[in-house]
Image (cartoon, rainbow, N blue to C red):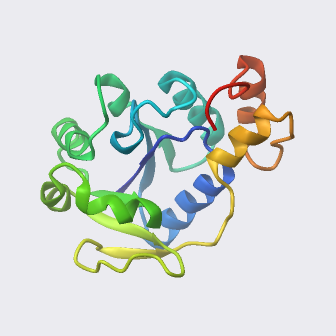
Amino acid sequence: MVGLFGGSFDPIHHGHLILARVAMESLELDEVRFLPAREQPFKVGQHAATAEDRARMLELAIEGAEGFRVDRTELSREGPSFTVDTLRTLLRESPGIEPVLLIGADAMHDFPKWREVDEVRRLARVAVFDRPGGPRDAGAVWRRVPAPLIDISSTAIRQRVRHGQSIRYWVPDAVAQYIAAHGLYQDGMA
């Protein structure tokens, strides 16, 4: 089984990486593919870094991590990144894979609003990172992944950068270096 962990990753941080590793271990996944969205449908116009910068930071963050890889499928299409389209593409290109969507409890709240949600459920198993007080729609979920409570957010990281605060330990060192070298998150939206 292949875990599909999609999102903005604006930027990727240690919380994302820990959740991916926990999912890989608890679901006994063969690999986890990080799928950076060109543009998330629920965040249109809200990405602070370009899709290419976000993908590059992902590559730096997982370099050398066994079982992790970046999948650029969503970056090859124009417009918003709809999961149903991604699943169709992946299954067409790799017909033998068994996809497992890895969804955060916050994203699970919007899951019923996803494009062709019934088709998404048909094409992939859905695993949600289980947090205390999270949604309990048992009909949509194949498995729940016990997720450690890690209070790190990409929004907080962008704010720290904009205010000149250190992001060491919030993101992998290579990601912090990339952000500094490319002047990301200095101005603009949180």
Residue drawn where x is 73% and y is 25% of the image: 186
Which quadrant of the structure image shows residue 144? bottom left
Q: State the image coordinates of residue 19 (x, y, percent, origin top left).
A: 56, 61
In the image, taking residue 140 as reference, residue 173 lies left or right, namely right
Q: Is residue 127 visible?
A: yes
Residue drawn where x is 29% and y is 22% of the image: 78
Q: Nearer the viewer, residue 100 or 47?
A: 47
Residue 177 in the image: above or below residue 106:
above
Q: Is residue 1 visible?
A: no
Residue 42 in the image: above or below residue 182:
below
Q: Nearer the viewer, residue 65 or 159?
A: 159
Q: State the image coordinates of residue 107 (x, y, percent, origin top left).
A: 41, 59
Q: Nearer the viewer, residue 58 or 49?
A: 49
Location of the C terminus (image quadrant) = top right
Name the residue furthest top: 182
Q: Nearer the viewer, residue 140 or 46?
A: 46
Which quadrant of the structure image shows residue 124? bottom left
Q: State the image coordinates of residue 79 (x, y, percent, origin top left).
A: 29, 26
